[in-house]
């Protein structure tokens, strides 16, 4: 028996729960969502009836609404949005759940109006039910997915075709996003490029062996991660695979394109696929919502940040007497120069110390010229190191956000001498206000190369959505707590 035949036999031994995960997972998600909806209703009911200062003890909702009618409406909308059967990024799931719960609540209000019970049912109860339903469904889904992924339960078996850099990136994305639940059964490639993937997964054969692997294993999901294939070769590969599987995904040769807002239009008669790219930030409505989101969240954050800021200001002054807030000129939207506020983390005569240090340490000068940062910066004070590691030095930038100079999420604010390093991407940078946080903040921060930061800024501008902003804010909290890449 050949080596490839042995590998194919190994691929066929899939546990039953993997073979039927496409049936079991939707059922489990259905009951999880049902529990989340009922719990949301019960909490809103108790708050409105007993727990709030404006409680209404006489308020009553029949059990049939709590356990049957309302959950059925929400579950139907969730099913129509394919949230029970489709693996998707968690931020996209959040957007879908938000829309479906909103539509479900609007339908409930509509039915209440025609049933002539709208004057009896509390509007506060309805509003709380929607907020809690959205929050609990996402929370329960996240906890369930984390548990299943951690214990390798009800994963979707998938075969990866192509074992190069693209496959590494795809699998890295799956590992970091709980919205996906794939289990890689093995890889297909004539000449695997990635040594890392070859160590972690079975190479089940070459391109000519793919039909045998699929027939013996029963795998129904295939991902082609070989964007370098010629169109004719890709078409031939898809045609060979399609009779044996239910789902084929492939990474097209569009790396670098703004893929966050793509629409695919099929011209069936001509057998042509047309891709439409939307520029969300070109919409005045989207820019308005982004601005409102920035203001509302910044005001909420300032309620908690002000007391902490007073304590930090006192600590900065005690450690190094002088101004506690430092205003550094940065480039913003439409090339506007603005003072970017930060808590002072350096000694007052920082520029003179930097010049002297770079003259004495040529290797540090090379590091400075490369990234405009020093890992062991002699100018940074003791409290300054703590502030930088925790990113608390950026708290005053909420003032910049309220002024309109910055956004909560956006490209990294840069100084004038950095403009040449952006090259053709500088136009993207100028389209939006720079952000307190952004892609670079949650993807390694100072550990990333300058070229990577530039590409991240451009990607954000081209793929913006309000959900991406929300995701990066939550990811920033996680990165700040870990302190990864901060100096």
Image (tube, rainbow, N blue to C red):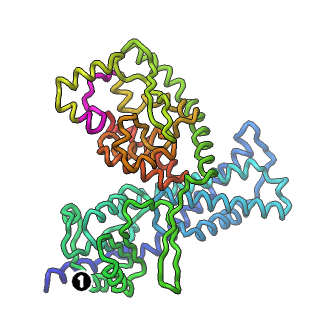
Q: Quadrant of residue 394?
A: top left
| Mark 1 secondary-structure assignment | helix
Please state the total of marks drawn on the protein image.
1
Which residue appears at 73% of the width and 36% of the height?
Answer: 53
**In the rendering, at what x and y percent does residue 325 appear?**
46, 21
* Magenta stretch, main secondary structure class: loop
Left-right relation of 274 to 7: right
The magenta region covers: 367-382
Q: In what quadrant of the picture does the N terminus appear?
A: bottom left
Residue 191 is one of the magenta-drawn residues = no
Q: In what quadrant of the picture does the C terminus appear?
A: top left
Mark 1 Cα within 10 Å, few/some/many (few <14, many 20+)?
some
Considering depth in this image, is 350 or 399 the residue closer to the camera?
Answer: 350
Considering depth in this image, is 140 or 190 the residue closer to the camera?
Answer: 190
Regarding residue 473, the answer to whether it shows in the image is: no
Mark 1 = which residue?
209
Left-right relation of 26 to 52: left
**In the rendering, at what x and y percent does residue 120 appear?**
83, 53
């Amino acid at each position: 028996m050949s080596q490839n035949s042995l590998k194919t036999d190994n691929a066929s031994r899939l546990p039953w729960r993997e073979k039927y995960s496409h049936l079991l997972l939707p059922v489990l998600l259905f009951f999880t969502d049902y529990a989340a909806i009922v719990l949301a209703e019960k909490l809103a009911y108790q708050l409105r009836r007993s727990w709030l200062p404006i409680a209404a003890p006489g308020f009553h909702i029949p059990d049939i609404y709590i356990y049957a009618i309302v959950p059925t409406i929400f579950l139907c909308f969730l099913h129509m949005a394919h949230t029970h059967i489709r693996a998707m990024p968690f931020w996209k799931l959040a957007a879908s759940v938000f829309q479906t719960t909103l539509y479900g609540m609007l339908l409930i209000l509509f039915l209440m109006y025609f049933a002539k019970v709208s004057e009896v049912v509390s509007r506060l109860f309805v509003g709380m039910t929607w907020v809690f339903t959205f929050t609990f469904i996402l929370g329960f889904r996240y906890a369930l997915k984390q548990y299943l992924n951690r214990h390798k339960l009800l994963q979707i078996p998938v075969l990866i075709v192509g074992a190069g850099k693209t496959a590494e990136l795809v699998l890295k994305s799956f590992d970091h996003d709980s919205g996906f639940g794939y289990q890689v059964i093995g890889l297909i490639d004539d000449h695997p490029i990635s040594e890392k993937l070859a160590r972690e997964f079975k190479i089940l054969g070459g391109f000519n062996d793919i039909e045998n692997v699929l027939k013996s294993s029963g795998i129904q999901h295939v991902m082609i991660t070989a964007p370098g294939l010629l169109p004719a070769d890709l078409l031939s590969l898809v045609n060979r695979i399609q009779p044996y599987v239910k789902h084929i995904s492939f990474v097209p040769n569009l790396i670098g394109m703004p893929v966050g807002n793509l629409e695919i239009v099929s011209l069936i008669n001509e057998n042509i696929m047309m891709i439409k790219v939307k520029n969300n930030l070109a919409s005045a409505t989207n820019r308005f919502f982004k601005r409102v989101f920035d203001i509302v969240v910044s005001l909420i954050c300032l309620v908690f940040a002000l007391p902490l800021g007073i304590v930090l200001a006192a600590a900065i002054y005690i450690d190094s007497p002088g101004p506690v807030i430092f205003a550094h000129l940065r480039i913003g939207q439409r090339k506007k120069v603005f003072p970017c506020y930060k808590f002072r983390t350096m000694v007052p005569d920082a520029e003179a110390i930097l010049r002297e240090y770079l003259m004495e340490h040529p290797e540090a000068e090379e590091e400075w010229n490369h990234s405009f940062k020093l890992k062991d910066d002699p100018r940074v004070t003791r409290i300054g190191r703590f502030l930088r590691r925790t990113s608390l030095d950026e708290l005053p930038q909420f003032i910049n956000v309220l002024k309109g100079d910055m956004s909560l999420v956006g490209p990294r604010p840069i100084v004038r001498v950095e403009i040449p390093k952006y090259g053709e991407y500088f136009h993207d940078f100028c389209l939006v206000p720079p952000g307190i946080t952004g892609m670079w903040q949650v993807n390694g921060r100072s550990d990333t190369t300058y070229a990577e930061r530039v590409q991240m800024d451009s990607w954000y501008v081209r793929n913006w959505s309000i959900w991406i902003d929300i995701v990066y804010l939550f990811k920033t909290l996680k990165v700040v707590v870990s302190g990864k890449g901060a100096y």
